Structures are given as C-alpha cells and as structure tokens.
Image: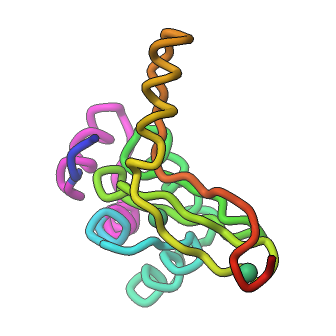
Amino acid sequence: MAEAVTADRAARSLQQLGYRLTPQRIMILEAVLESDDHVTAEELYEQVRVQYPHISFSTVYRTMELLRDSGFVTQTDLGGGRVQYHPVGKATHHHLVCQGCGSVAEVGEEIFTGLQQELRERHNFDATLTHFAIFGRCERCR
Ligand SMILES: [Zn+2]
Ligand SMILES: [Zn+2]
C-alpha cells in the first residue's frame, strides 16, 4: 500500500516534473490530500472558490487529473456522473454502489487479496487494485 502523501510532498514532486504551482493549485492539493473523506471536483471547486472567486471549474478538474496521473489521488467513478477523489494512501477500501437506490457502502481492500494472488500466480501480473466501485443491488433493492 502506498503511504500517505502530504500536500507539501505532492507540491514538490509536481514542481520537479515541471508544473507551475499557483496558489490555487496548492489550495486544491491541500484540500484533497489532507481530507480523510472523498471529495468530488464540484466540492473542491466550492471550497477553493471561497478564497479564489475567479477560479474556473476546469482549473480544478485539470489539477485533479494531474494529481491522478501523477499517482497522488485515486479517481473512482461511482456512477451517475459522481466522480470521487481520494488520497492514494488512504484509499484502503472499495465501494459497493447500488444501481437501484444509489447507496454506497465501503468494504475493506482484503476482499481482493485472493484475486490479486491469483492474477500474480496465473498471469504473472501484479494488479493495482485501489479504490474500486463495484456495482450491483443492495439488500433492499433486490
Ligand atoms: Zn472510498
Ligand atoms: Zn439499493
């Protein structure tokens, strides 16, 4: 499991990769990496806008894509246009998403331990199984 990444460390890595770090970007970094919860791009946009009213939604979205591509956050599509971000080091669980009522439950990452092992043994493949959304029906909707 990847260790938790601080906003400082992420900022330094991005700079080393040649990205310009604006105060807005730093605020987005801090908001997502220091959060223990999931955040959507919309929620981040609302947060950052309080301090930087002129920031555009696409700036927030592009920053999140950059963080995802550099491996600092996971991006999980929970269906229905809901995309959540979570710091990589804290994403030690998966989600069960009900396609009936839209409820979301968490399950521990150990649920995929067997699968991971099997992929390694049978296909010599080291799978990265981080923060999945698994779709189906909950007890009430079945
Ligand atoms: Zn999650
Ligand atoms: Zn349901």
Instruction: Name which residue lies at 46% across and 17% down.
Output: 120
Residue 77 image-quadrant placement: bottom right
Give the main secondary structure, helix, strand or loop, of the magenta stretch. helix
Residue shown at the point (31%, 72%) measured from the top left: 36
Residue 79: give x, y in percent of width and height.
74, 65
The answer to whether residue 120 is above or below residue 85 is: above
Q: Nearer the viewer, residue 32 or 2?
A: 2
Where does the image place residue 8, in percent across and percent down from the top left?
18, 54
Q: In this view, does 49 lie above or below 59?
A: below
Residue found 73% across the figure and 85% down from its top: 140
Q: In which quarter of the image is ligand 2?
A: bottom right
Residue that appears at 63% across and 63% down = 58
Q: Position of residue 135 (x, y in %)?
A: 71, 60
Quadrant of the snapshot with the N terminus: top left
Q: Is residue 130 above or below residue 28?
A: above
Report how many numbered discs are placed on residues in the image.
Answer: 0
Magenta residues (range): 6-29
Whether residue 112 sits left or right of residue 132 in the image: it is: left
Q: Of residues 111 and 64, which is closer to you in this image? A: 111
Q: Which colour scheme appears in the figure?
A: rainbow
Q: Residue 109 in the image: state x and y as whole percent.
A: 40, 51
Q: Quadrant of the C terminus?
A: bottom right
Q: Quadrant of residue 95?
A: bottom right
Q: Does the magenta stretch include residue 80?
A: no
Q: Does 10 appear in magenta?
A: yes
